[in-house]
């Protein structure tokens, strides 16, 4: 899941689509295309990528399909990255202890 | 957004920090907990509970840059790049580690499509950006 989230977020147009959906609460391929320098078919493709990553959900309202942001995958990815960063902090602290401690013992 | 960058100041010379970060004898202490061995450009790390992992060295420029690829935490989905840089800072060393590449995992088809469309996103963001981004989008 996390990898798909990264892939989805790699594209600036998709990030803009998420921003627009977050700002407006929801949107359709048509309303999004009106605010973007890309065609409606391109928006539909981008929405499909976001949908596969679980970042948006489609809701049918009569004849139109509205998209809303699904926050959980973003939060899960941010939390996952935080854990990996904490792992590196711990490893770097261990390197520091080894480097400084061993230096002291030689003196 | 798929990059983790951490730095630390160490009160020891660059050469000493280089030795500890790169030599299997020390890697087995601060990175793994069950030893490490090197054959050619591959270091095999061992953990008591997590088994083994291979670090495939891609850059080794003593005492400035050391980089390897290793399988991401979920086996089988590809590998990420870990790059250490060592810089003198005062009488000590500024050690930086950057891990990147999750965005490339298991996504070859999507990536190829993006490349074909000339639609390649920048990957210069860091963890902080992702956290801020997650907040702005999910508030």
Image (cartoon, rainbow, N blue to C red):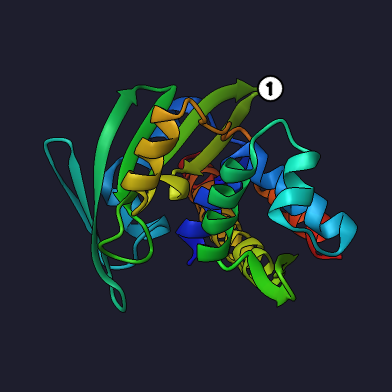
Q: Nearer the viewer, residue B56 or A102?
A: B56
Vertical order, B6 against B114 (above or below): below
Q: Position of residue B13 (x, y in %)?
A: 52, 28
Q: Quadrant of residue B16?
A: top left
Quarter of the figure with residue A38 = top right
Q: Quadrant of the C terminus of chain B?
A: bottom right
Q: At which x and y percent is residue A59?
A: 69, 75
Quadrant in the rendering for residue A85: bottom right
x, y percent for residue B8: 63, 41
- At 50% across and 64% down in the image, what residue appears? A52
The residue lying toward the viewer, choosing from A82 and A4, is A4
Q: Is residue A10 left or right of residue A58?
A: left
Residue under the point 48% across and 67% down: A1
Rendered view: B57 above or below B74 = above
Q: Which residue corresponds to the image point at 37% horizontal and 31% vertical from the top-left? A: B66
Which residue occupies the extreme left position in the image? B39
Residue B1 visible within the image: no
Q: Which residue is mark 1?
A: B90
Kindly identify the residue that appears in the image at 31 percent across and 27 percent down: B59
Residue A46, x across and y down, in percent:
57, 49
In the foreground, B99 or B119: B119
């Amino acid at each position: 899941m996390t990898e798909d989230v990264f892939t989805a977020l790699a594209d600036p147009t998709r990030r803009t689509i998420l921003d627009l959906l977050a700002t407006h609460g929801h949107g359709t391929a048509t309303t999004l295309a009106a605010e973007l320098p890309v065609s409606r078919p391109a928006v539909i493709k981008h929405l499909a990528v976001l949908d596969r990553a679980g970042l948006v959900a489609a809701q049918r309202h009569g004849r139109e399909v509205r998209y809303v942001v699904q926050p959980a995958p973003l939060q899960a990815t941010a939390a996952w990255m935080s854990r990996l960063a904490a792992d590196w902090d711990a490893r770097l602290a261990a390197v520091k202890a080894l480097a400084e401690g061993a230096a002291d013992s030689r003196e | 957004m798929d990059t983790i960058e951490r730095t630390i100041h160490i009160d020891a010379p660059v050469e000493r920090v280089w030795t500890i970060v790169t030599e299997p004898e020390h890697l087995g202490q601060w990175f793994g907990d069950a030893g490490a061995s090197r054959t050619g450009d591959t270091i095999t790390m061992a953990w008591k509970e997590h088994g083994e992992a291979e670090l495939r060295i891609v850059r080794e420029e003593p005492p400035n840059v050391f980089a390897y690829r290793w399988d991401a935490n979920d086996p089988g989905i590809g590998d990420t790049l870990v790059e250490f840089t060592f810089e003198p800072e005062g009488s000590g060393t500024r050690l930086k580690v950057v891990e990147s590449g999750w965005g490339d995992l298991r996504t070859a088809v999507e990536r190829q499509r993006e490349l074909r469309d000339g639609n390649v996103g920048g990957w210069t963001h860091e963890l902080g950006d992702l956290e801020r981004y997650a907040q702005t989008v999910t508030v």
